[in-house]
Image (cartoon, rainbow, N blue to C red):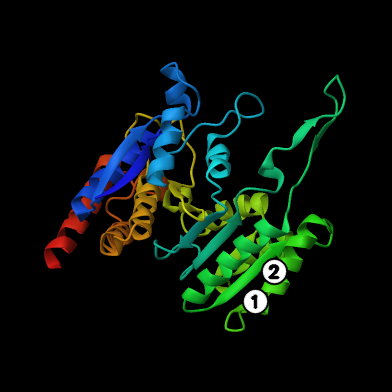
Amino acid sequence: MKKVTLIKGDGIGPEVVDSALRVLEAAGAEIAWEEHLAGISAVDRGEDILPETTLESFRRTRVALKGPLTTPLGTGFRSVNVTLRKEFDLFANVRPSKTLIQGGRYEDVDLVIVRENTEGLYAGVEHYVDRRHHYAESITIVSREASERVIRYAFELARSRPRRKLTLVHKANILKFTSGLFLEVGRELSGRYPDVEFDERIIDAMAMQLVLDPTRFDVIVTTNMFGDILSDLCAGLVGGLGLAPASNIGADAAMFEAVHGSAPDIAGKGIANPAALIQAAALLCEHVGQAKVAGRVQSAVERVVLRGDARTPDLGGDATTAEFTAAVIEEVTSGVRAS
C-alpha cells in the first residue's frame, strides 16, 4: 500500500479530487491517502497558506496528488504551486496533450510539453526599482545545471516514445544569454542522443506552427514561462484545460495535478470537468508502479470522452461532474471484470 499526500485544493478542487479518488478505488489502486490542506482552504481554517504539516507529509511520502489552488492576481501571497515545486526541486513539469474528441479541430494530436519548473522568470526574483513603484524589474534565472537535467529528461522521454523526436523552444535571437544558454545546452546534449531527432524553434514561430499543424511535434522542451504558455495552447488544441493533466517530477519526489485553475465561479455547481485530475491520478499510479491501474483509468476516460454521452459543459455536453465520474467508473469496472 503506497502512502500518498493528498491536497484537495480550492474552488472546484475538492469536487474533482473526490471524483479521481472514486475512480482510483474502482480501478483497484493500492494507495493510502494522507490528506492535508494548502491554499485558501488552509487560510480559511486559520493556518498558513502552506502548513508545515502538509510539507512534512510530502517529505515522508515523496508523492502528492494536488487539486487546483487559488493564486491572487498581482497582490497577495505567492503561488503555492511554485513554492511546492521549488521546495521539492520538482524540476520537470510534464504536460501531455492528446486528441480524445474526434471530429474536433485537429485529429491525432499526441505531444508532451516538458517545461523547466524551477527557474526562469518564475524564480520570483523581482522588485520595484523606485520608491513610488513606477518601475518594476524581474530577473530571469537560467543555469546550465537546471537546463541540462530538464533537457536530458526530455531526451529520455522522447527516446521512449515511438516517434523519438524532440523540439527545443527558445528565444535566443533576442534573449541571447538566458535563452541562448538553454539552447546551447540542448545542442550539446543532442550529440548524446543520436537516435532522437532534434530540432529547435523560436517561441513565437512555435506558437504559430502548433496552431497550423500540431501533429508534426512529439516532445517539446522549453523554459518555465514559455512552457506554461505553450502547454495551455496545446490543451486548447485537444479540447481545453479540462482534459490536461500534469506531472511535476524531481529526482526523488513527484506531484500530480490538473493544469487548470480552481475555477471559483463554478465551484459547488456540480459541473466541473474532473477528467484532467483523473488522468493526473492515473499518471501518479504509473509513477508508483501501479501501471495496470493507470492503464484502466486512462482508457476509461478516453472511452467516455470519445463516446460523448457524458461530457461536461466545457466539452460541449450537459453532464454533471457526478455523471461523468459515474460513466468513467462504469468503464473502469467493466475493464476490471474483463481482466
- Name which of mark 2 and mark 1 comes first in the sequence: 2
Side of 21 relative to 262 (left or right): left
Residue 8: percent from the left, percent from the top? 37, 35
Q: Quadrant of residue 218?
A: bottom right
Q: Is residue 227 above or below residue 196?
A: above
Side of 295 relative to 157 (left or right): left
Side of 132 relative to 141 (left or right): right
Label 2 – label 1 distance at C-alpha:
9 Å
Q: Quadrant of residue 76?
A: top right
Side of 266 relative to 297 (left or right): right
Q: Quadrant of the C terminus?
A: bottom left
The residue where tag 1 is placed is 198
Task: Choose between 336 and 140: the one closer to the eye.
Answer: 140
Question: Which mark, by number, is residue 305?
Answer: none
Residue 69: percent from the left, percent from the top? 48, 34
Q: Amino acid at mark 1?
A: Phe
The residue where tag 2 is placed is 186
Q: Secondary structure at mark 1?
A: strand
Residue at coordinates 82% horizontally, 56% vertically from top-left?
175
Q: Is residue 318 above or below residue 104?
A: above
Q: Is residue 60 above or below residue 223?
A: above
Circle 1 packing at 10 Å, graded few (<14), some (14-19), many (20+), is many
Residue at coordinates 60% horizontally, 67% vertically from top-left?
152
Residue 4: percent from the left, percent from the top? 34, 44
